[in-house]
């Protein structure tokens, strides 16, 4: 039988992939009055992954999902099970009295609006990276979270997961095992986003295209931006400036986050951003920090940390040192130890929702890393050296470039006041 248009094989197989905790033998599940009521905003590929993790947590009750594509919305509601209500507009979801927290997994250009709205609604937030689509948005999200005392976790999973490899690398660097740190190479592909030039295609029924676009300029539908139905592929909106910075706010932001961690710069950032000399190059940009260390967009896939006495390489599958003896010698009790999550980053967030402590990748950490990524994109786009003051969140001596820290938004999808 021919499947209806827009429904992929993933839609037919999705239910068995996500099994609620109760079905796995979690009989000691707390009563509804003691569960954390969570809502999911964005039910695409990443949203479904997070939904599956939420459903395995005994104390979580997924009470609502929000998605602008009807096929994806109905699919997520079915996976979440009885008691879950589906919405097209995230603001309606945030009105629910039984909602304690939300997970934001929409395209990047929506993150700040939805995160700030959630903070104003007194909901704790787990937001995929970057927390803002511009530097101004990232800072506004921090202000909103602080003013409303929200527990806000940024989805920089490398700090918590992958068997702690990234944390270990940062601990060795901050313990001086490489000698004086000289440079960090962030190896992700090139691909600075460009203005969208996709042709119009017929839109499947059930997609609220105006709301998908939200604050971005009005343009015709193309399935590369919002793939039809339930899909397994990564959407192509990451390639276009209206919705994303490209590689630096996609895979790049996770590696830049580790560079910030290694440099103990979670409340800071670079002071100079220098694009490559070749005006066509999409790799080779350099971030210069006040201590002289350079973070370079380039090198092998992963992160290479280079010091005067040796180097470390880390990615999601391995951690290695040169010379090998660096990692063969365990860290002592008095050497650097960085905060570790109790399991996944999502698990750490849920624990913090209950304890009210700040999570491992608190909102300001996420906003600072997003700012590093955005500064790199601005330097690439404009082929201009930038000077940055991390403490004031301002560009130095460049009034024209200051306007680049934010963007125009299409009414009525404006940024809420922090």
Image (cartoon, helix red, strand yellow):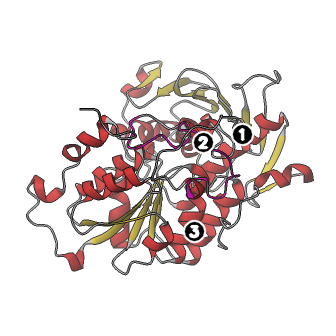
As helix, strand or loop, the secondary structure at mark 2 comes to helix
Residue drawn at point x = 57 percent, y = 24 percent: 309
Q: Is residue 29 left or right of residue 294?
A: left
Residue 76 location, x and y as percent? 32, 54
Q: Which mark is residue 377?
A: 1
Residue drawn at point x = 36 percent, y = 34 percent: 330
Q: 400 and 333: which one is in front?
A: 400
Q: Which mark is residue 116?
A: 3
Highlighted magenta segment, given as a residue range = 211-232
Residue 303 location, x and y as percent? 53, 29
Q: Is residue 308 above or below residue 143?
A: above
Q: Is residue 151 above or below residue 55?
A: below
Q: Is residue 289 left or right of residue 37?
A: right
As helix, strand or loop, the secondary structure at mark 1 comes to helix
Residue drawn at point x = 25 percent, y = 41 percent: 12
* The quarter of the displayed image where residue 324 is located: top left
Q: 376 and 84: which one is in front?
A: 84
At label 3, counting other C-alpha atoms closer than 10 Å, the crowd grade (few under 14, some 14-19, many 20 or more) is: many
């Amino acid at each position: 039988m021919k499947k209806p248009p827009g429904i992929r094989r993933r839609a037919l197989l999705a239910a068995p992939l996500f099994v609620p905790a109760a079905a796995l033998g979690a009989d000691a599940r707390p009563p509804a009055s003691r569960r954390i009521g969570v809502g999911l905003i964005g039910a695409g590929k990443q949203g479904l992954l997070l939904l599956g993790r939420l459903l395995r947590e005994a104390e979580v009750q997924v009470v609502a999902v929000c998605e602008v594509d009807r096929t994806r919305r109905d699919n997520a509601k079915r996976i979440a099970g009885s008691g879950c209500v589906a919405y097209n507009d995230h603001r309606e979801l945030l009105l629910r009295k039984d909602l304690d927290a939300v997970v934001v997994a929409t395209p990047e250009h929506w993150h700040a609006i939805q995160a700030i709205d959630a903070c104003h609604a007194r909901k704790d937030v787990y937001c995929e990276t970057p927390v803002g689509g511009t530097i101004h948005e990232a800072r506004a999200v921090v202000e909103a979270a602080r003013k409303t005392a929200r527990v806000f976790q940024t989805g920089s999973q490398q700090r918590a997961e992958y068997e702690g490899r990234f944390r270990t690398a940062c601990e060795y660097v901050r313990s001086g095992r490489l000698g004086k740190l000289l440079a960090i190479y962030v190896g992700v592909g090139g691909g600075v986003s460009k203005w969208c030039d996709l042709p119009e295609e017929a839109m499947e029924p059930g997609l609220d295209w105006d709301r998908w676009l939200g604050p971005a300029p009005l343009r015709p539908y193309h399935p590369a931006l919002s793939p039809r139905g339930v899909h397994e592929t990564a959407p192509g909106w990451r390639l276009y400036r209206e919705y994303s910075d490209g590689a630096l706010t996609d895979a790049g932001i996770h590696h830049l986050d580790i560079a910030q961690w290694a440099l103990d710069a979670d409340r800071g950032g670079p002071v100079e951003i220098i694009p490559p000399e070749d005006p066509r190059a999409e790799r080779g940009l350099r971030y210069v920090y006040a201590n002289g260390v350079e973070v370079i967009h380039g090198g092998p896939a992963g992160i290479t940390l280079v010091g005067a006495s040796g180097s470390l390489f880390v990615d999601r599958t391995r951690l290695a040192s040169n010379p090998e003896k660096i990692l063969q010698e365990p860290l002592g009790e008095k050497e650097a130890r960085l905060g570790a999550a109790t399991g996944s980053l999502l698990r750490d967030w849920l624990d913090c929702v209950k304890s009210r402590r700040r999570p491992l990748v608190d909102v300001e950490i996420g906003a600072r890393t997003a700012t590093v990524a955005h500064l790199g994109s601005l330097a690439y786009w404009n082929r201009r050296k930038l000077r940055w003051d991390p403490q004031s969140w301002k560009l130095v001596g460049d009034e024209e470039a200051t306007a680049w820290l934010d963007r125009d938004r299409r009414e009525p999808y404006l940024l809420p006041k922090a």
